Amino acid sequence: MNIDKVVLVYPKRDGRILGKAQGSPYTLMRLASLVPDELPVEIWDEDLAPIPFHKITKNTLMGITSKTLSIERAQEIAAGARKRGARVVVGGTHATLAPEEVSQWADITAVGEGYFTWRKIIDDVTNDRAEKMYVDESWANLEGVARLTDRVLNMVNEKRDYWTPYMEITRGCPRNCSFCTAIRVSGRVMRHRPIDEVVEEIERRDIKRFFLTDDNFGLNFRTDPEYIEQLFRALKKLPLNGWTNQAEMMVGDFPDLIQLAKEAHMDKFFIGFESVNAGNRRDLGGKSKGNIEEYKRVIRTVQKFGIGVVGLFVFGLDADTPDVFQSTWDFCKESGLDNVSFTIMTPYPGTPSREEYIRDGRLHQNVPWSKYDTSHVVFDPVSMTADQLREGYDWICRKAYSLPSIATRGVRTLRRHPLKVARRKLFSSFSTDFGYRRTYSYRSA
Ligand code: B12
Ligand code: SF4
């Protein structure tokens, strides 16, 4: 095929929020940077603007990325593009978790990481030898991989069009939580980008804030403290306003690194406490044990250094009874968490949880993938009914994401910073809770 243009597409979910889309299309920026210089490349983010179908020709190679919740929209876009003769490649989370399903309507399905396969796909399509499916689950070294090109940085206006830039520093997580899809997408081998590449990327993008895409950045505090220390010392020198990352409780055991994190301008740890119910331990791969006194100790330790803690909780695990909502809410209030995220257990394809629910006849049938958004109930829990899970979730979200609750937590967070930096911290003090309020609002959409 004679490719005259490569387009990379992010299917719509949230649209613009107060004029900007939520986060920069980082996955597509990395993939666009792999397109050979001689081929024109464009990024079409449907959260920013409608897909310009009229610009698609039979010489267009289209790559679509999609999570499970947007796969139906991805399929519509693919059908529109194929009608105009384009060749369509679909990759990302859902294609990795359910490749047979996706390959029924995509020309090419990319499973796992695209850092090496995407270039090969372009080359194979050009030379008319493309295969139906490309798989990369080798979890290769990240050194020198998909460095963002200036062409791509000139194409995406991160400051004007997006609230949050994303950034990848590490990838993978060696744990094995039964409901987790992240490890199926980025593997159970923890890999690090070289620190000089990280610094160079931040400087060249000229970003002052970012959200780390890393699945379990905090685990490196234990497994690779030297890397973390050097990273923090390098980030300290940059003029950053703040950054956030996903971690687990054991970061509380490393006060020296938390101090360095603060000096490196880190704002918040998103910590997966997952459950206040000790009975759920089995599902949590050994990382959270439902010991709420321990949770509180970790929160206090981190906050003492001026870093915020966002508590992540999931409802509907096997041992959850209807009183889990009240006990979680009590914990949130007592513990002084800065922000809270509540999700309903969602059995994504490719996870052991889903297999178990299917085996037990507990998975709800004919539910569209768009409802797999962690705010809808798509299965029958063991220790309560689906209605109780739905109602309890609504109850706790109404409490936690009410404007007075958000204001109370936001002001508390803001007061942790010295007055002279308060303006810079205003956005991050409130934005996380507002984001989750929006996610929850899909319940009634
Ligand atoms: C950053 C992130 C977000 C960001 C948004 C990022 C974005 N713009 O989409 C935020 C914080 C907003 C977010 C929100 C949510 N997220 Co999220 N998120 C992630 C995270 C941590 C990293 C993704 C990322 O950017 N990685 C870095 C880039 C460079 O890598 P990548 O995307 O994996 O892409 C590589 C490959 O997948 C492949 N590839 C990807 N696309 C394509 C396309 C082609 C053509 C090819 C060839 C290759 C290819 O190549 C890339 C390079 O190797 C992943 C976890 C993970 N490890 O995947 C979860 C993850 C994708 N999110 C998940 C979920 C559930 C959600 C929420 C529903 C959670 C919630 N309740 O709020 C919401 C949904 C929001 C929405 N509207 O879509 C799940 C998805 C599960 C599923 N089956 O769909 C994941 C896997 C995490 C998990 N919980 O298991 N998320
Ligand atoms: S710790 Fe987090 S990223 Fe790692 S397997 Fe568990 S849920 Fe997934």
Image (spheres, grey):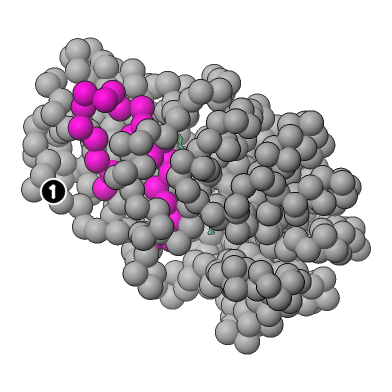
Q: Which residues are magenta?
A: 21-44
Residue 176 spot, x, y in % from top left: 69, 37
Against 81, residue 309 (above or below) is below
Give residue 193's quadrant in the image.
top right
* 214 over 307 or under it: above or below: above
Figure disc tally: 1
**Assess mark 1: CB under 8 A from ligand 1?**
no
Where residue 209 sits, quadrant-wise, is bottom right
Few, some or many residues within 10 Å of mark 1 (<14, 14–19, 20+): few
Front residue of 428 and 359: 428
In the rendered structure, which amino acid carries the disc numbered 1?
A: Phe
Q: Residue at x 62, y 42 (%)?
A: 215
User: What is the x, y in percent for residue 4?
Assistant: 13, 29
Determine whether, in the image, residue 318 is placed left or right of residue 136: right
358 sits left or right of 73 in the view: right
> What residue sits 69% from the left and 58% below the top?
268
Q: Nearer the viewer, residue 20 or 175?
A: 20
Instruction: Look at the image and tell me in which quarter the N terminus lies.
Output: top left
Q: Position of residue 285 (x, y in %)?
A: 75, 41
- Residue visible at 87% across and 59% down? 301
Q: Residue furthest bottom?
A: 404
Q: Quadrant of residue 269?
A: bottom right
Residue 56, position as x, y percentages in the image: 12, 41
Identify which residue, 44 or 177, lies in the foreground: 44
398 is within the stretch colored magenta? no
Which residue corresponds to mark 1?
Answer: 53
At x 68%, y 72%, the residue is 420
Quarter holding the C terminus is: bottom left
On the question of residue 350 being in view, the answer is no
Q: Is residue 40 magenta?
A: yes
Q: Secondary structure at mark 1?
A: helix
Q: Is residue 127 left or right of residue 140?
A: left
